[in-house]
Image (cartoon, grey):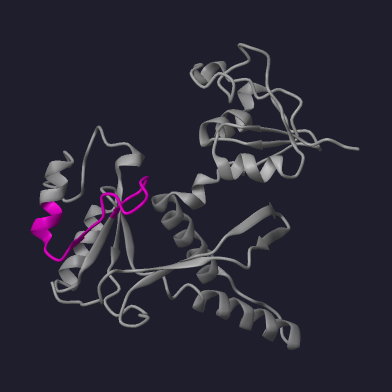
Amino acid sequence: MVVVKFRTDFDKFVIMHAFERRGWVRCRLPHGGGADDDDPGAPREAYNPGGDWNVYWASVGSAKAIFNPETGFRLSDTQIINHFPNHYELTRKDLLVKNVKRYAKSLEKSEVGGSGAGASAAALMLETERDELDFIPVTYVLPADFSLFAEEFRRNPSTTWIMKPTARARGVGIFLINRMTQVKRWAAQMGIDTSRGSAYTSHLSGRDAYVCSRYIDKPLLVGGKKFDMRIYVCVTSYRPLRVWWCDEGFARFTNVKYSSDP
């Protein structure tokens, strides 16, 4: 009987229960093996991705260390972890915006040559892909896109915008703006100089940046309330794209009915 061995950086019940109920055995490194489940206080530079494990539920830091070419570590055919290399290109707000814009621009440049049924089908598919992006509101990354945002703001001065930190979650740091003075006040608090026509800062990191999107003032409502849906999927491959969809999910509703009034 084949025994599956796992490692984890988290002693969370849902992870441990899911693994152990399948009869999987926890793999532990020898003492001093590095910053892992046995020695969480060890420095990250001492991290050792080794061990006789098959499944590793790793933290973001551990995943970066595993995929870092300098470690010299390579996953074997019997090893999988819960992150893809550079996964933050899709999971961090500012990088997601960058990649969506890049994808949209590539669609604009795409041309379907030839004639006949095959070319017509390809052109229709390309047009469909372009249309599927129309749900994404106008979005800028601040402070990098400050001058572009200011120009758009002047063209539509009555528009409301929503500001979100790029690297936070659970609604932390989100606020709405509808006046340029609010943006400049935020910039001053963040130490951003906007007097040069474009935002300038020498100390802000990417994690301190904000995404600024046009606020959707007529959202889809259920019973007059805003909501979101949490759907779980597991992506096991990008090439070819392979996604496992969980039939069970949940919806979250606001406590009060939506109103666009300030």
Where 63 falls versus 140 (above or below)?
above
Give me the residue at 60% from left, 42% from top. 15
* Residue found farthest to the top: 32
Quarter of the rendering containing residue 262: bottom left
Give the percent coordinates (x, y) of residue 13: 56, 41
Who's the residue at 62% across and 83% down the image?
124
Q: Is residue 55 above or below residue 251?
A: above
- Picture residue at 55% right of the left edge, 20% below the top: 35
Work out whether residue 71 can be spotted: yes
Q: x and y percent of residue 48 in the render?
A: 63, 20
For this orientation, the residue located farthest to the right is 1
Q: Is residue 168 magenta-colored?
A: yes
Q: Residue at x 68, y 86 (%)?
A: 120
On-image quarter of the N terminus: top right
Q: Is residue 175 magenta?
A: yes
Residue closer to the observer: 204 or 170 = 170
Instruction: Please state which of residues 11 and 117 is positioned toward the viewer in this rendering.
Output: 11
Find the residue positioned furthest to the bottom.
116
Q: Nearer the viewer, residue 214 or 8?
A: 8
Q: Is residue 61 left or right of residue 76?
A: left
Q: Is residue 196 visible?
A: no
Residue 96: x and y, percent? 45, 55
Q: Position of residue 242 (x, y in %)?
A: 71, 59
**Observer-nearest of 70 and 110:** 70
Q: Which stretch did the figure color magenta?
A: 164-184
Asked if residue 129 is positioned above or below residue 48 in the image, the reply reads below
Query: In which quadrant of the rendered view does residue 180 lie?
Result: bottom left
Q: Is residue 58 left or right of residue 134?
A: right
